[in-house]
Amino acid sequence: MLVGLLLCAGAAGGTPAGARPSASGSPVSASAAADAPRAPEPADVRLSDERTFTRWAYAARRRPVYRRPSGTAARVSRLRWYTEDGFPEIYLVLRAREDQHGQRWVKLRIPGRPNGRTGWVRRESLGALHLTHTLIVVNRSRLRMSFYSNGRRLWSAPVGIGMSGMPTPAGRFWIRERFKILDPSSGYYPYAFGTSAYSVLSEWPGGGVVGIHGPYHESRRIPGPISHGCIRLRVRDTFWLAAHVRLGTPVHVF
């Protein structure tokens, strides 16, 4: 599904008057060299707008993630196979670019601390691209979650969010994991979804991944600031979300 990029270079103009041959035999002059048009910057192809269409991929190789689309740029992370819970790791992809050497690159969002990092990987480091048209938006001031499909809001429900000192982090995240909880006595019942957001509680088991899950025995306290950073839904609302959400769905928290 990745769009191939065709980069075209303009043809050179005629030989300017007064030009002298270079050591290689090419006619050049100091003024012509200064005035010659520079090669255009490689154009990006948008892979996701994170609202109406979003693409994501699994890692195909455990390769470095670079700050810029260049193998000489600083490394900011490395692709990994699995999440903290043993699910295949998901990377949300933003743009594609082909550089001057024909190397294809993809810009992606990086799960992990600190929240909000992005970087570039070589295209072959990722597997096939998957597409979703859904979006989850969490409004912390209104204590509500909304679900969108193709930009149209289909559903909204009250939520529990992080308490003072343990806030649900704001930012652009996505759904990485999906658990079906069979035991009704579990606080996470009936479903839990792992996101790419990390809480301030780094010592929490599993690294402090922010989840979306059932009410944890506190349905009556929803909506409200009741959690350690996770987003809680009433049981019936968790069932609704599970029937509609897909892996790779963006989660915008503000």
Image: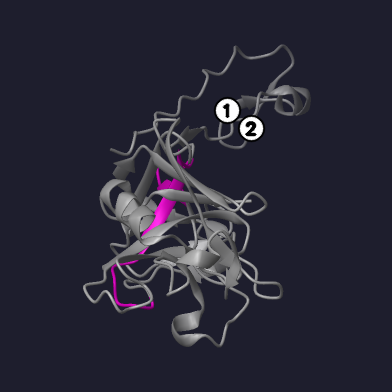
Rendered location of residue 103, percent (x, y)? 40, 47
99 part of magenta stretch: yes
- What's under tag 2, amino acid-wise? Ser
In the image, 5 versus 236, the foreground residue is 236
Above or below, 229 relative to 185: above
Query: Which residue lies at the image location 33% right of the left edge and 41% below the top edge?
Result: 132
Left/right of residue 114 with respect to residue 183 in the rendered view: right
The mark found on residue 232 in the picture is none
Left/right of residue 10 with respect to residue 233 in the rendered view: right
Residue 195 seen in the figure: yes
* Start-end of magenta stretch: 84-107
Could you tell me which secondary element the residue under label 2 belongs to? loop
Residues marked 1 and 2 touching at CB (< 8 Å):
yes
Residue 74 seen in the figure: no
- Toward which corner of the image does residue 34 lie, by quadrant? top right
Q: Number of marks in the image? A: 2
Q: CA distance from mark 1 to mark 2?
A: 5 Å
Residue occupied by mark 1: 26
Query: Which residue lies at the image location 47% right of the left edge and 64% below the top edge?
Result: 232
Query: Which residue lies at the image location 33% right of the left edge and 73% below the top edge?
Result: 82
Above or below, 22 relative to 250: above
